[in-house]
Amino acid sequence: MKKLIGIALIVLLSGFKANHNASISVTGIVLDGKNNQPLANVAIAVKGTNIGTTTGKDGKFFLTSLQNEAVLIFNVVNYKEKIVAFNSKSSDIVVKMTSLKYEMQIDSMEFEIVQENVLVKPGIARAKTDKKYPGKSEMMMSSQATRHITVSDSYFSPPHNTEEYDFIQENIFHNPKNVPLSTFSIDVDAASYSNMRRSINSRQMPLKDMIRIEEMINYFNYNYPNPDGEHPFSITTEVAQAPWNPKHQLIHIGLQGKKLDYENTDPSNLVFLIDVSGSMSAQNKLPLLKSALKMLVNQLGHKDKIAIVAYAGAAGLVLAPTPASNREVIISALDNLKSGGPTAGGEGIKLAYKIAEENIVENGNNRVILATDGDFNVGVSSTSEMVRLIEEKRQSGIYLTITGFGMGNYKDGRMEQISNAGNGNYYYIDNLNEARKVFITEMKATLFTIAKDVKIQVEFNPDKVQAYRLIGYENRKLNAEDFNNDKKDAGELGAGHSVTALYEIIPQGIKSAFSRNIDPLKYKNETPNSHSNELLTVKFRYKKPNESASKLITHTLDSQTIDINKTSDNFRYAASVAEFGMLLRDSEFKQNASYQNVITLALGAKGEDKEGYRQEFINLVRNVEILDKEKI
């Protein structure tokens, strides 16, 4: 009993608040069974529940809300899965995992060659040759001899952390007299937020380049007014002092997409493109992926069709297009997927688009849903090759959704670039709750695009604005001339989705360390400003999903600044998330930002919070504050 009390005190002091209904808590460490070295990024799942975590750099972990005699499942790349029966007498445990041999003749990962470039696991639904869909699944059990494959070291991720994130060069302040226009593509991706959360829940500070502030802001829904005019979205703007520097101002721009009657929408033609390579074997990868896709299947209607393409050493059609109402067949095909082998992602993408194109629904929703950890290593595999491939495929009118899974060898930068190139969006699934959010709460809206190639261009009034800075969207910036170029790709807006963007500005007459010291222009325009009350003009361009010519909307914002305490909950909550993102990035522009300021802002703007996502954010901030202090 004293031991349990001691653990509870440790948890309380560390700032990680446990559920008050928790029966038992456990702390432990995971070690390499041979050399007793700590293992980082081990995925830990509690069997039969949604509870899970990962080990930190020191191999340690903490779990709460456990029942007595719970079963813990430990998974990490290159190690044999470990199952531990836990009870209240073992609240402090040491787990030792056995390393796999790098070179092995596969038993559990043998494949039968049933068609050129198609690999099928023996003992599961074998592909029966079909004229239109070679490899069409008919649930035939195979007892034929199999061809053995020897997997080399390169097919496995090394035991150390090989996660990859693209470098982000943070946006700087610009003088509107020299750079009058700020142009960018909208972004409704949310992968950065859930990936950041995964890191914090593993008691690790997120890497700087893991943080894309616009994705953190747009993880949340905002209460913007629904559109009521000819355009499929409404526009909201506000201006108040910046929370991290009251001498500066914060501009808030919000778009709200029109909601649809999902009972009367056009049918969906979906192709699940599933990575079943060896790197997907961990509990928080392929098993979680299957659970997530089953959620989506249960949301679809009788008019919708689903096909499944899987890829490992090669790509194959696991399930030909099947009505979503035939759920047992679809779920059985998902259940039969097993992981093993290298990753031929490029071949998988080509086959998935081929199936989608052959079954395209005119005026319907045609989409490939890619589920992977991004570790492509066979065939077309470099990021640049994959981006070019996806850019070519997007011309077909088929949209792309990427869902990322796992950690340790996760390739975030690659998947973000592919998503940006492919008329699509990008999510990271770190647990079942996130899977529920993406595939039940939001996927219906995501599937139905109401506006494509949505671009924003802001022109600032130099009489009012000394300098401005776009917060986030570094990977979505466009050249000024791209705004009117209808051939230039940009972001998509789904039904009911909202988009939020923030600018920090330095008003004229304010001394600031971020004002750029540039000599006055000799040939500047001396024409008197006839728009003296305007702070800025926002222009929007978008295309309807099936059109190639864009439409223009113009919106102005006056310079009348209001007190931040009188702004909307939308404004204050988005500002709190942006401030937290700057702290995580240790931004040079964070100024007087603090965790306490973030918490105060977010608490005051939490609103109804039916799903609890905003409260979860506040808890994450509190946890990071503790982690940050532990670094000192």
Image (tube, rainbow, N blue to C red):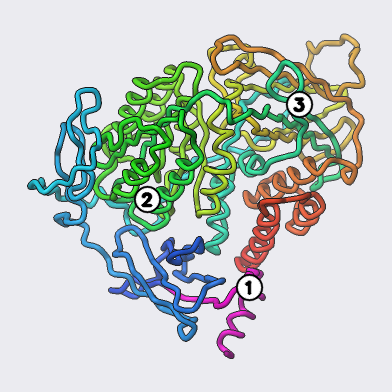
Question: Among all residues in the image, which is located at the extreme bottom?
Answer: 2
Q: The disc labelled 3 sits on which kind of residue?
A: Ile
Q: The residue tagged with tag 2: helix, strand or loop?
A: helix
Q: Which residues are magenta?
A: 1-29
Mark-to-mark CA distance, 3 and 1: 43 Å
The percent position of residue 215, horizontal first and vertical second, equals 61, 40
Q: The disc labelled 2 sits on which kind of residue?
A: Leu
* Marks 2 and 3, the one that precedes in the sequence: 3
Taking the magenta stretch, the answer to whether it contains residue 441 is no
Q: What's the residue at 26%, 35% (across, down)?
A: 315
Q: The disc labelled 1 sits on which kind of residue?
A: Asn
- Decide which of 322, 388 is in the foreground and name it: 322
Residue highlighted by disc 2: 286
- Judge left or right: residue 460 versus residue 124: right
Q: The residue tagged with tag 3: helix, strand or loop?
A: strand
State yes or no: discs 3 and 1 in contact (Cβ < 8 Å): no
- Report which quarter residue 371 is drawn in: top left
Residue 21 tag number: 1
Mark-to-mark CA distance, 2 and 1: 30 Å
Q: What's the residue at 75%, 31% (across, down)?
A: 253
Crowding around mark 1 (Cα neighbors within 10 Å: few <14, some 14 to 19, many 20+) is few
Mark-to-mark CA distance, 2 and 3: 40 Å
The percent position of residue 450, horizontal first and vertical second, equals 60, 23
The percent position of residue 377, horizontal first and vertical second, equals 29, 40
- Report which quarter residue 445 is drawn in: top right
- Decide which of 362, 571 is in the foreground and name it: 362
Q: The residue tagged with tag 1: helix, strand or loop?
A: loop
* Marks 2 and 1, the one that precedes in the sequence: 1
Residue 235 tag number: 3
Crowding around mark 3 (Cα neighbors within 10 Å: few <14, some 14 to 19, many 20+) is many
